[in-house]
């Protein structure tokens, strides 16, 4: 059940979750999300491993059901294309299957994940659950730097931070049952 009213006008492109009560904030939030999907250069499996773990932690049903590879066409149609040509999901490697998504919660014991995918899931957990400790864990950072270059670490960090914020916003306000994913284009675009 949504915890704030849908106050859209009939010509407002925002979904119920982005209802225009704070249009400038909504536009910034949407632009951040759009940029993450459009600009990330992480493989689809690495990105989706981290994203789905955050969806589980946040409890966001809409985020949990979203599949970037399957929904990329609709995402591109709804948000349009930006300077980088829109969401590059198709060009980011093979798409995960449903067994991949189902195994994310048991990533420590599942044999479905590569080392990079495991580290992405672990990093998602660390950012969501133990952000105070993570910067000080030197052994962790050695593992990360052995698997990812500097740009990939920054890419993954921006992505995870965005998924935490969007998923928590969506779930906390009760929009995950009614949220129209993918996100619409900001009104100012």
Image: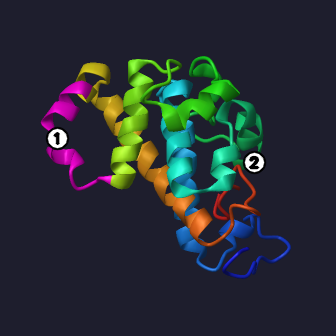
Percent across and percent down for residue 71 are 73, 37
Quick check: can you spot residue 49? Answer: yes
Q: How many numbered markers are drawn?
A: 2
Residue 100 falls left or right of residue 147: right
Q: Which residues are magenta?
A: 130-143
Q: Which residue is mark 2?
A: 78
Q: Residue 95 appears in which quarter of the rendering? A: top right
Q: Residue 137: which disc?
A: 1
Percent across and percent down for residue 8 are 77, 76
Q: Give the dominant element type of the magenta stretch: helix, strand or loop.
A: helix
Q: Residue 24 appears in which quarter of the rendering? A: bottom right
- Decide: few, some or many residues near mark 1? Use Cα within 10 Å; few <14, some 14-19, many ≥20: few
Judged from the image, the secondary structure of the residue bearing numbered disc 1 is: loop
Q: Quick one: 133 or 72, which is closer to the camera?
A: 133
Magenta span includes 132 = yes
Q: Residue at x 70, y 35 (%)?
A: 72
- Which residue is the extreme one toward the front? 109
Quadrant of the image for the N terminus?
Answer: bottom right
Quick check: can you spot residue 88? Answer: no
Q: Quick one: 7 or 138, which is closer to the camera?
A: 138
Percent across and percent down for residue 18 are 66, 67
Q: Is residue 185 above or below residue 171?
A: above
Q: Is residue 116 above or below residue 76?
A: above
Magenta span includes 1 = no
Residue 148 falls left or right of residue 83: left
Q: Residue 3 appears in which quarter of the rendering? A: bottom right
Q: Is residue 184 above or below residue 109?
A: below
Judged from the image, the secondary structure of the residue bearing numbered disc 2 is: helix
Q: Residue at x 64, y 46 (%)?
A: 64
């Amino acid at each position: 059940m949504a915890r704030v009213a849908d106050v859209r006008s009939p010509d407002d492109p925002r979904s119920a979750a982005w209802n225009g009560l704070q249009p400038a904030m909504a536009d910034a939030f949407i632009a951040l999300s759009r940029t993450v999907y459009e600009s990330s250069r992480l493989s689809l499996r690495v990105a989706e491993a981290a994203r789905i773990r955050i969806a589980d932690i946040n409890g966001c049903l809409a985020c949990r059901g979203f599949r970037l590879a399957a929904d990329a066409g609709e995402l591109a149609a709804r948000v349009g294309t930006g300077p980088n040509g829109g969401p590059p999901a198709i060009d980011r490697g093979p798409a995960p299957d449903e067994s991949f998504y189902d195994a994310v919660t048991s990533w420590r014991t599942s044999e479905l994940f590569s080392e990079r995918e495991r580290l992405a899931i672990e990093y998602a957990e660390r950012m969501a659950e133990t952000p105070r400790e993570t910067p000080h864990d030197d052994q962790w950072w050695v593992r990360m730097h052995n698997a990812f270059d500097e740009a990939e670490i920054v890419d993954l960090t921006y992505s995870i931070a965005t998924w935490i914020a969007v998923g928590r916003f969506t779930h906390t306000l009760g929009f995950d049952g009614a949220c129209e994913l993918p996100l619409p284009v900001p009104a100012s675009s």
